[in-house]
Amino acid sequence: MDSPWNELTLAFSRTSMFPFFDIAHYLVSVMALKHQPGAAELAWKNPLSSWFTAMLHCFGGGILSCVLLAEPPLRFLANSTNVLLASSIWYIAFFCPCDLVSQGYSFLPVQLLAAGMKEVTRTWKIVGGVTHANSYYKNGWIVMIAIGWARVTAPKTKIREGNDKAEEFIFSGAGGSIITNFEQLIKGCWKPEAEEWLKMSYTAKVTLLGSVIFTFQQTKHLAISRHNLMFFFTVFLVATKITMMITETALMPFACFEDTLSQMLFGWQQKFLPCEKKSETKSSFNGTGSSTSKPVANASEKVKKKHSKKTE
């Protein structure tokens, strides 16, 4: 007979994401789109373009994973229930009378609840991506990590005003961010400095970490059951997300680890820099010494010539 803890974690791992957690994911993604500059005006002028952009924000990670696995990119349209649900949330978010949805979403408790539920879907999508990649490439851990990382959708945008640093880490992500960058490139408003490959955000890093962990668990290199790992990782995601939103600070749990790893792998090169600087200074001194000796020699020759003229 299983212990109560195993029963709890097993029941948690079997929780269905439809419809409540999917609604939270779509709501956060659509509201992130709405707070982009000019998005509300575009919805009134060109609703079809706005709807297509919203679907990329909601299903961008799935589209990218399908492209990487040579599957039809429009596979997400086969699940008509989720598409209709996401489309309904897009419609009420942009066209609700008196903008009631945005006003209700502006309350911090609502944002905390939606963001926490969205983090639960992050774990499920990572596990789904790793498992799906393993069905194509058995124990191909590099492919499994890539698909698990790309499966998650979390567009980067501005949600709150007055704390840009915190906003950057609240809503940014992995695969979905790359798809939305492609969409911005088509629209002519792509910014290279915001590319996820060049400057990975916290959520992109934690998604990559989760993909690595679940890949090791899938390949039997990590001695822990999947349902326990899903529970612990989800608790970590929700706790860090809520802490970042409440404190409005860019919490970086991996900063110490990244600095230590950087010093171990690349810090040894800095030890040779003082030696190179010393050699450069010596060569510069030798160069200045030889250059200063030349004017002195020329001056002495001029004095000798003047003295010889006077004697003549």
Image: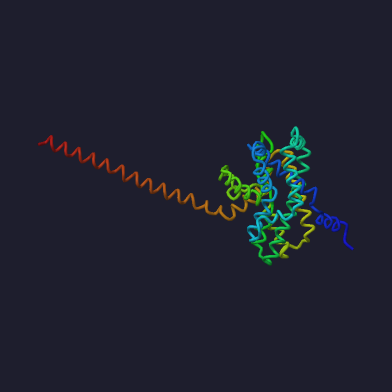
**How many tags in the picture?**
0
Query: In which quadrant will I find the N terminus?
Result: bottom right
Specify whether residue 64 is in view: yes
User: Residue at point 61% right, 47% down?
Assistant: 183
The colour scheme applied to this rendered structure is rainbow
Query: Residue 243 or 101: which is nearer the viewer?
Result: 101
Q: Nearer the viewer, residue 154 or 223?
A: 154
**Residue drawn 63% across the image and 57% down it:** 67
Does 271 appear above or below 89?
Answer: below
On the image, the x and y values in percent for residue 242 come to: 75, 43
Asked whether 32 or 238 is in front, the reply is: 32
Place residue 96 in its image quadrant: top right
- Give above or below for 160 relative to 198: above
Q: Position of residue 53 (x, y in %)?
A: 66, 45
Which image quadrant for residue 97? top right
Of residues 259 and 140, the one nearer the viewer is 140
Would residue 107 be seen by someone viewing this image from the given angle? Answer: no
Most extreme residue toward the top is 98
Q: Quadrant of the C terminus?
A: top left
From the top left corner, tell me how far across and down residue 287 is, in percent. 34, 46
Furthest toward the right, the residue is: 1
State the image coordinates of residue 305 (x, y, percent, origin top left).
16, 39
Task: Name the side, left or right, on which 245 lies relative to 185.
Answer: right
Q: In this image, 300 relative to 86: left or right?
A: left
**For residue 70, which quarter of the picture?**
bottom right
Residue lying farthest bottom? 138
